[in-house]
Image: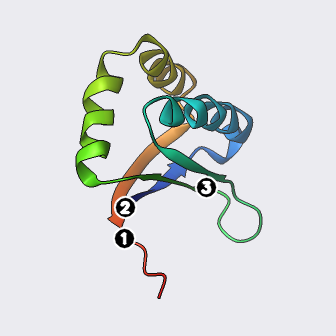
Amino acid sequence: MVTCYLRYIIDAGKLKEFEHYGKLWIPLVEKFGGAHHGYFLPSEGANNVALALFTFPSLAAYEQYRIRMADDAECQAAFRYAEQTKCIFSYERSFFRPVFE
């Protein structure tokens, strides 16, 4: 199992647009076999940092998701929405493995 952690720097004045963007991606990750754990929007503290977490059964499954989403019309529309609204300044992606015991 691998969890993808996305840390976004967003335009604080476009929080509504970023929230919409996140809502677009949750079912798309699930469509390709992932389990989305949600987007986490600013509340207290920094008003321009947002997070997202989603899990795939393996890094290979995540890599297949990346390949498949590149050709998916809904995924491309979500990317275009972010570009058009300019709600995201930058993001970084990291991967983690869980420890349960």
Residue found 61% across the figure and 28% down from its top? 24
Q: Is residue 62 above or below residue 46?
A: above
Q: Nearer the viewer, mark 1 or mark 3?
A: 1
Q: Is 21 placed left or right of 66 in the picture? A: right
Residue found 77% across the figure and 62% down from its top? 43
Q: Amino acid at mark 3?
A: Asn
Dot 2: few (<14), some (14–19), or many (≥20) neighbours within 10 Å?
few
Q: Which mark is residue 97?
A: 1
Q: Is 63 placed left or right of 40 in the picture? A: left
Q: Amino acid at mark 1?
A: Arg
Q: Which mark is residue 1?
A: 2
On the image, the x and y values in percent for residue 11 come to 60, 43
Cβ–Cβ below 8 Å for labels 2 and 1? yes
* Image quadrant in which you'd find residue 65: top left
Q: Nearer the viewer, mark 3 or mark 2?
A: 2
Q: Is residue 43 above or below residue 98?
A: above
Question: Which residue, given by chain and number where applicable, does mark 3 sit on?
Answer: 48
On the image, the x and y values in percent for residue 1 come to 37, 61
Name the N-terminal-most of marks 3 and 2.
2
In 3D space, how far apart are the residues under numbered discs 2 and 1 (Cα atoms)?
Answer: 6 Å
Q: Nearer the viewer, mark 2 or mark 1?
A: 2
Dot 3: few (<14), some (14–19), or many (≥20) neighbours within 10 Å?
some
- How many dots with numbers? 3
Residue found 48% across the figure and 82% down from its top? 100
Q: SS class of the residue under badge 2?
A: loop
